[in-house]
Amino acid sequence: MREFWIIFKQSFLTKAKTKSFFITTLIMVAGIFLFANLPSIIDKVGKMMGSEEDDRVLVVDESGVLFDRLLEQLQQNEQGISLELTEKTQDQLSEKVKSEEIEAFMELSFDAEQTIHASYTTGSLVEQSLPSALQDALQNIQTEVKADQLALSGEQVSELFAPIQFEKHNISETAKSEEELNQARVLVYVLMFVIYFAVIIYSSMIATEVATEKSSRVMEILISSVSPVKHMFAKVLGIGSLGIVQILVYAVSGFLAYTLSSAGEKNELSAFFSLENLEVSTLVYAVIFFLLGYFLYATLAALLGSLVSRTEDVQQMIMPMSLLIVAAFIIAATGLGNPELGYLKIASFIPFFAPLVMFLRVGMLDLPLWEPLLSIGIMVVTIFILGWFGAKVYRGGVLMYGPSRSLKDLKKAIQLGKE
């Protein structure tokens, strides 16, 4: 057991002390704080760049009445758009737009049936919020004009445009309220990304570490004093522990960033990531499926890494494993809109898909307890089987050198391990 903990400690500390690990962690923590405070940063940059000024639009009003009504409508809605009445020609205004003296200009008129005609000219139609705001304001004016033509009172107009009463009810035992479902969807989406990237990054790290030791011939010295099986699981647990520590650092940073960004006035970001209705069970399942998913793929990665002699061949060897986790993420992502789809239920019991798909279902639906427990049980059994088979392959694979022939080397590694 002493040899196991020596390799465990070596795997953990070697990676933890590297500059790349420290810099990556620091960049990620900085990115988390940057993202959490992005709205306030954008506002401050906008003020520095002068973009807080109202958008300036010149208006040619051929009707003689629309400009004042439009200006009043925008002021009521606090749109932040600056209108200026002008009598310049279309050619003169076009030149001002080209020289970027003004954002845009608009020509307004009435036809014989008192229908508003508006022509909006700008240098680029990429910006959609400004013309959309003007169009909405003019649509309100058009409604008022038509109401006057039909001699409708304000109350009659309000009745005419009164929204319908549309209520949503569910009688499904596995359904949550709409508010709970939206918040669960956001949380599940974030945690799915965490599980997905963690499994890919740390599994690849294990495979690369094993291949590096083989290429430097260090492996031959190690297995003379410790069994290959102990070596494999020490690697898996050592790098896994490092990954958990790194994720905890990210989680604490994310919590602090979220708290600081939400300490003052509520913004769109804090509302989007609201944790008011967060269920503790969702976080518990996130931890369980993360650990099970990691050990499942990490054991497979150690197995595949033992078959290659050069670090350059690692990515090619673990490509099938990477495709499995990518497929799991795609399947889970398609269920964010409707987690009750039939194929999601089937995929949630397939061990290589379960860490993401079952977590999606258990996070967004009120499932009977037997479903997540069955999925967890299947994953645990799969990990033991994969560990038993992986130990056989690893025992011979670490002694194999020469060019890799992908998965064809499995049989040779098992035979070598028996010898």
Image (spheres, rainbow, N blue to C red):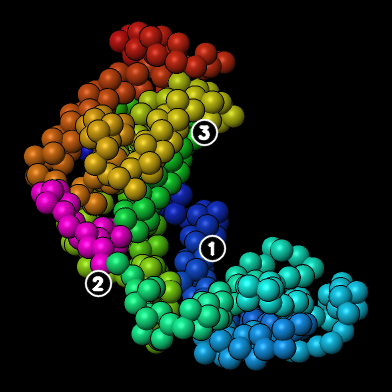
Main SS category, magenta section: loop
Instruction: Work out which quarter of the rendered image holds the C terminus and state it.
Output: top left
Q: Name the residue under label 3.
A: 212
Image quadrant of residue 322? top left
Residue 304: x percent and y percent?
42, 25
Magenta stretch, residue numbers: 165-184
Image quadrant of residue 233? top left
Residue 139: x percent and y percent?
56, 74
Q: Name the residue under label 1.
A: 27
CA–CA distance in space, label 3 to label 2: 46 Å
Q: Is residue 322 above or below residue 164?
A: above
**Residue 63 in view, yes or no:** yes
Which amino acid type is marked by label 1? Ile
Which amino acid type is marked by label 2? Glu
Of marks 3 and 1, which one's residue comes earlier in the chain?
Answer: 1
Element assignment for label 3: helix
Q: Residues within 10 Å of mark 2 (few under 14, many from 20)?
A: few
Q: Is residue 156 above or below residue 362?
A: below
Element assignment for label 2: loop
Element assignment for label 1: helix
* Left or right: 276 in relation to 19: left
**Residue 263 in view, yes or no:** no
CA–CA distance in space, label 2 to label 1: 29 Å
Q: Nearer the viewer, mark 2 or mark 1?
A: 2
Which amino acid type is marked by label 3? Thr
Q: Nearer the viewer, mark 3 or mark 2?
A: 2
